[in-house]
Amino acid sequence: MYNFTFEIPTRIHFGQGQLKRLRELKESGSEVLLVYGGGSIKRSGLYDDVLKILREAGLGVFELSGVEPNPRIESVRKGVRLCRENGIDMVLAVGGGSVIDCAKVTAAGAKYDGDAWDLVIDPSKITAALPVYAVLTIAATGSEMDSFAVISDLSRNEKWGTGSPLFTPKMSILDPSYTFSVSRRQTAAGTADIMSHTFENYFTTEEGFLQARFCEAVLKTCIHYGPVALKDPENYEARANLMWASSWAINGTLNAGCGVNWCVHPMEHELSAFYDITHGQGLAILTPHWMEYVLSADTVDKFAEYGVNVWDLDPKADKWLNAREAIERTRRFFKDALEIPMTLREVGITTQEKFEIMAEKAAAGCEGCYVPLKKEDIVKIYQAAF
Amino acid sequence: MYNFTFEIPTRIHFGQGQLKRLRELKESGSEVLLVYGGGSIKRSGLYDDVLKILREAGLGVFELSGVEPNPRIESVRKGVRLCRENGIDMVLAVGGGSVIDCAKVTAAGAKYDGDAWDLVIDPSKITAALPVYAVLTIAATGSEMDSFAVISDLSRNEKWGTGSPLFTPKMSILDPSYTFSVSRRQTAAGTADIMSHTFENYFTTEEGFLQARFCEAVLKTCIHYGPVALKDPENYEARANLMWASSWAINGTLNAGCGVNWCVHPMEHELSAFYDITHGQGLAILTPHWMEYVLSADTVDKFAEYGVNVWDLDPKADKWLNAREAIERTRRFFKDALEIPMTLREVGITTQEKFEIMAEKAAAGCEGCYVPLKKEDIVKIYQAAF
């Protein structure tokens, strides 16, 4: 176990009816920038509920709406302008990971003199930020309880993760009933995203026994409740467990003392940057191919352990058999239980022409991983997933 | 899953050489009350190291030493006087759970006009406290990352748990190498304590799938590494995993959304209050008898699940068989793997004369438990454990 510092500054209010806790925003001032995406929070009535509580609390509200999936730097810049022009004291995201990520970089951009894109490509420039709050409406990225944000500049085919302790929300409201209306497709992609975060933490060169068991706990929760939420979208226990799992997959617990660089995420970010595909689908497509590619005499024990502890394979069986079966179970889970399209073609990437350029960019993030990957390796993984 | 608010305000610095982070105490002022137990931190050199760092940081140091296992209200009162007389700004505990618990109530007592015992029997009176810091030297109670404290008044045979968010340490240093010198007996008792906290959270009437899997992760870690630490006391991975498990067993994660009143702890507190036995040993002795006593058609599924998920029993076997085997494995683990004396007689309780009075007091804490227990039930459990 490596040395580490562990700190989760986010206060979580979890459960039905917790929205009223938005009154607590008064602790950070009087003017709120409300950040959200499309019309879904208006259709569901959440938008009206949020405004009512904020206004009753005497808070002034300005709005940044229309934040995209794979949020764009243009939205951040718009948010930063709104903050500066209106003396905004805090940023409140109401939505999923894209909205929260946009809110985080907006909050830091408001305290930064240059262009907000600088903060995306160089996190060391993030030295101050407005307080961030979140009301979560989809279980997926874990942005509600972590210090990361991913922003795209599609004009340049760039999608980068950035992060700062200043990004970590001060308070997040997690009401599982807000996810009852999340589509089958997004529920599946969100579940794959949670699992991918967990895999990135689980497959590590540094031993962390407790941390590995925590990872397995999150994976088992996704495997148990992902399909339940697809079949029965208003199943509260399923939605609650997925929502809480999304936060734990990435809040710093699973990798404390044993984290290494992530690998599948950098590969997927290029797919989204060039083709704007759904992040969780891209992760699900790449994951089994990545697992097959890195399976070797060095890694077989870990994959076999994964098979035994997560997929209940027979611990007495041959470890290569268990490792391969575990990877196959992972693939089948995404394909059959979550009904995710499992080739790049099916999500609209119909040519291999960009594989080289994408792989070259992804390779920069794949050093220091569980199994370090070079450009050639990543091209092969893209090809296998094609 | 119930509604809940989740918040862990403790900053943890984990690993070898983290003691230098004590410099951060400057954030809370200039005068420190250093709280510790017997001579062990002086023999190990930790005492000198702590003083050196505090003095180099320009902090003034006052001392409360001699804090007992099962810490007494008399030590708290002495600490409160030292705080008042010397304008103390913060309390630093260097030791195990007893020392940290004493520091917590001292920190609140310094801000309270009446006698500190009031804060033990009525937590609602805790409305302010000095900041608490901790350097942990034994993996057991989890006091380094939680909001609880247990204080005894042996003159009245009283031992009560109290708690407040204000008790939660602002920062704790967890250096596993400080536990290399913990005796076999205390290592075993500490491991049993961690497991008992986890059982109290695991056996609940409210479903929390993710939380149950997290509990199993902590239990498996104790089962894996407890015996390793006994055989090989300087095994860093074993000590590190046990230390980190101690914090997670009780930091609010395992019971968030699904907690019920604890049951074995109130029964054990009476044993310690009347006979001053080692808390972890008392818990280990009572646990299997409590499990057998509450096993019924209502609880058999949960005990069978415990057997399958923690002890790797065959999921296809009869559930009653698995439940009973899981309880037997628990008993054998404490007895054979951790070498804990498993009867009350062996720890010096040689007569049953106080069972009635102890059971009557314990019963007050055993309402609203997984299986509510009355005085008669508790007497029977004490008798079985005799």
Image: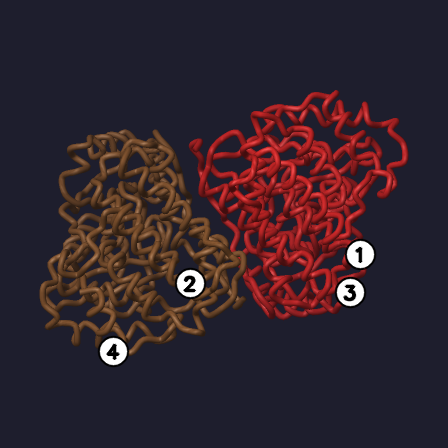
Chain colours: A red, B brown
Q: Residue at x 21, y 56 (%)?
A: B342
Q: Residue at x 70, y 53 (%)?
A: A96
Classed neighbour count for the residue bearing mark 1: other residues with Cα under 10 Å, few (<14), some (14–19), many (≥20): some
Marks 4 and 2, the one that precedes in the sequence: 2
- Disc marking residue A42: 3
The residue carrying mark 1 is A38
Within 10 angstroms of label 3, few (less than 14), some, or many (20 or more) residues?
few
Q: Secondary structure beneath disc 1?
A: loop
Residue carrying label 2: B321
Do pointers 3 and 4 mark residues of a single chain?
Answer: no
- Quick check: do tags 4 and 2 share a chain? yes
Q: Which residue is mark 4?
A: B375
Q: Is residue A131 visible in this depiction of the protein?
A: no
Q: Position of residue B280 (x, y in %)?
A: 25, 54
Depth check, front residue: B23 or B285:
B285
The answer to whether any part of residue A276 appears in the image is yes
Three-letter code for the amino acid on which mark 1 is drawn = Gly
Give the spatial CA distance, label 2 vs label 3: 54 Å
Counting from the top left corner in percent of width and height, residue B80 is at 19, 55
Q: How far is the residue under mark 4 from the one under mark 2?
A: 29 Å
